[in-house]
Image: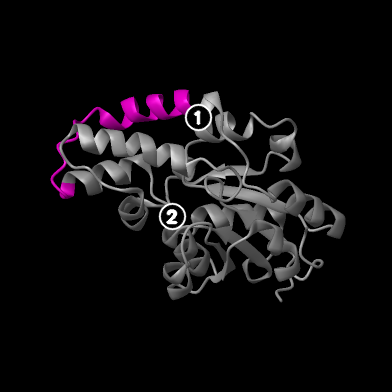
Amino acid sequence: MIKVRAVIFDCDGVVVDSEGLSFDLLAQELAQYGHPMGHDQMRALFLGGTMRSFWAEARALGVPLPDEWVDAQYARMFAALAEHTPLIPGIVEVLDALDAAGVPYAMGSNGPPRKMQITLGQHAGLIERFGRRIYSAQTLGAPKPAPDVYLHAAAVLAVAPADCVVVEDSVSGAKAARAAGMRCMGFAQHGQGDDLAAVGAVVFHHMPDLPSLLGLQTPLT
């Protein structure tokens, strides 16, 4: 059980269930350029990165993505996500439990602000629930695994890093939490989460279990 004074959530794959659609679009692009790849392989290679880092890593693997690909892919992704991006099951109840316990929270994502506005904005009141404490590592100029976005969120919350818990689903995000001196809960919705555990995260598989793991209450049902 972890006692906590503040929680900082990643966005994609932790609050909104956007990664399946994002990987579908990326898989289409890789196939178009002659490099088909399944979701599991893409998760291992690219989860938690930015579109720019995806472009660079794909180019390094021999995928001939053009120079203008990043902006074009963001446009395709934004259009697809705007149609429907569901929440991670149980996340609203987790926020309810934090509110009831008086524990403040924020969000730190590698995604651009426009993406978070699209995905979070589909759900009435969600952005306001975060008190607009929603930060992009790209805006700060230091994407994860750099710790900057989490340190920034902790400073705004006025909580020491050691008293914050980060909720992440990617290795790069878990590394960012560790570099920030924060404890990390690794949400492994897909798979066992051994990669998250290897970088120091406490792995869990069902979002409704999070409040009890944080020492707030028994698991939600």
Q: Secondary structure at mark 2?
A: loop
What's the residue type where badge 1 is placed?
A: Leu
Of residues 214 and 144, the one nearer the viewer is 214
Main SS of residues in magenta: helix
Return the mark for residue 81: 1
Among the 4 quarters of the image, the one containing residue 220: bottom right
The quadrant where residue 126 appears: top right
- Element carrying mark 1: helix
What stretch of residues is rendered in magenta?
A: 60-80
Tell me if 40 is positioned left or right of 55 in this view.
right
Q: Position of residue 182 (x, y in %)?
A: 58, 68
Measured as percent of width and height from the top left, residue 162 is found at 64, 71
Are the residues at dot 1 and dot 2 in contact (C-beta closer than 8 Å)?
no
Disc count in the image? 2
**According to the image, label 2 marks what residue?**
144
Q: Residue furthest right?
A: 100
Q: Position of residue 3 (x, y in %)?
A: 74, 73
Q: Quadrant of residue 16?
A: top right
Q: Is residue 186 magenta?
A: no
Q: Is residue 159 visible?
A: no
